[in-house]
Amino acid sequence: MNYFLAVNDRQLGTCLRMLFAEKLQPAVQTVLNEKGKIEFHISIAADQEVFEELNERYKIMIS
């Protein structure tokens, strides 16, 4: 399953604002990575093409 990865609150907020602006309802899962740090996995109900386009935009926004 594809998901947007946010490693801090700023990235999480950026991702959620982008998805809500696109009228998408994201599902957020909070997980601990192998280093014991919190990560947010944000998934959406969309086809692969839409996900890839949004993921590319998201990566530009957080860089």
Image: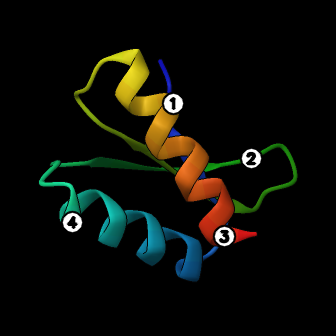
Specify which label sits upstream in the sequence, 1 or 3: 1
Q: Which residue is mark 4?
A: 21
- The crowding category of the residue bearing disc 4, from other C-alpha atoms within 10 Å (few below 14, some 14 to 19, many at least 20), is few
Q: Which residue is mark 1?
A: 52
Q: Is residue 23 above or below residue 62?
A: above
Q: Secondary structure at mark 4?
A: helix
Q: Amino acid at mark 2?
A: Asn
User: Left or right: where does residue 39 sit relative to residue 26?
Assistant: right
Identify which residue is drawn at 20% across, 63% down. Answer: 20
Q: Position of residue 7 (x, y in %)?
A: 67, 64
Specify which label sits upstream in the sequence, 1 or 4: 4
Q: Amino acid at mark 3?
A: Ile
Q: Nearer the viewer, residue 1 or 53?
A: 53
Q: Which residue is mark 3?
A: 62
User: Left or right: where does residue 38 sit relative to residue 22?
Assistant: right
Q: Amino acid at mark 4?
A: Ala
Q: Secondary structure at mark 1?
A: helix
Mark 4 to mark 3: distance in Å? 16 Å
Q: Amino acid at mark 1?
A: Glu
